[in-house]
Image: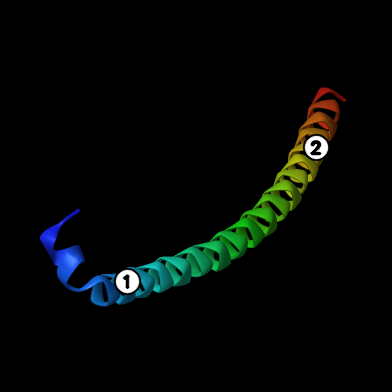
Amino acid sequence: MSAKLQKNPSIELESLESRLGELIAVCERLKDENRSLQSQKESLLADKAALLEKNQVARSRVEAMISRLKVMENS
């Protein structure tokens, strides 16, 4: 056992309690931040899916236009 702990166990206990309280606060902040980041991730994934779908629709329309132009050119 350390000399410091033998002399002032209540001070050591208070310090430990304080540090534990800080650790709990940090854990809570990180949990909140993680929830927020998960929510942002879900939103971004939904946006990405919507943009990919729009891109595919635009690509299909352009390909259809090109096909029509080729048909017109050959007529």
Nearest to N terminus: mark 1 or mark 2: 1
Q: Residue at x 48, y 63 (%)?
A: 27
Residue 17 placement: quadrant: bottom left
Location of residue 7 in the rendering, given as x and y in whole percent from the top left corner: 15, 71
Q: Amino acid at mark 2?
A: Ser
The Cα–Cα distance between marks 1 and 2, rounded to whole angstroms, is 70 Å
Q: Which of 65 and 46 lies nearest the eye of the viewer?
A: 46
Image mark for residue 63 = none
Q: Residue at x 49, y 69 (%)?
A: 29
Q: Residue at x 52, y 68 (%)?
A: 28
Residue on which the image places disc 1: 13
Q: Which of 71 and 36 lies nearest the eye of the viewer?
A: 36
Q: Is residue 19 left or right of residue 55?
A: left
**Marks 1,2: beta carbons within 8 A:** no
Q: Amino acid at mark 1?
A: Leu
Location of residue 59 in the rendering, given as x and y in whole percent from the top left corner: 74, 39
As drawn, which residue projects farthest toward the front?
Answer: 6
- Kind of element beneath mark 2: helix
Q: Is residue 58 left or right of residue 23?
A: right
Kindly report which numbered mark, 1 or 2, lies closer to the viewer in this rendering.
1
Residue on which the image places disc 2: 60
Q: Which of 38 and 16 lies nearest the eye of the viewer?
A: 16
Q: Residue at x 29, y 76 (%)?
A: 10
Location of residue 45 in the rendering, given as x and y in whole percent from the top left corner: 67, 50
- Disc 1 crowd rating (10 Å Cα; few below 14, some 14-19, many 20+) is few
Location of residue 61 in the rendering, given as x and y in whole percent from the top left corner: 81, 42
- Disc 2 crowd rating (10 Å Cα; few below 14, some 14-19, many 20+) is few
Question: Quadrant of the image for the C terminus?
Answer: top right
Q: Is residue 38 left or right of residue 55?
A: left
- Kind of element beneath mark 1: helix
- Determine whether 24 is above or below 74 in the image: below
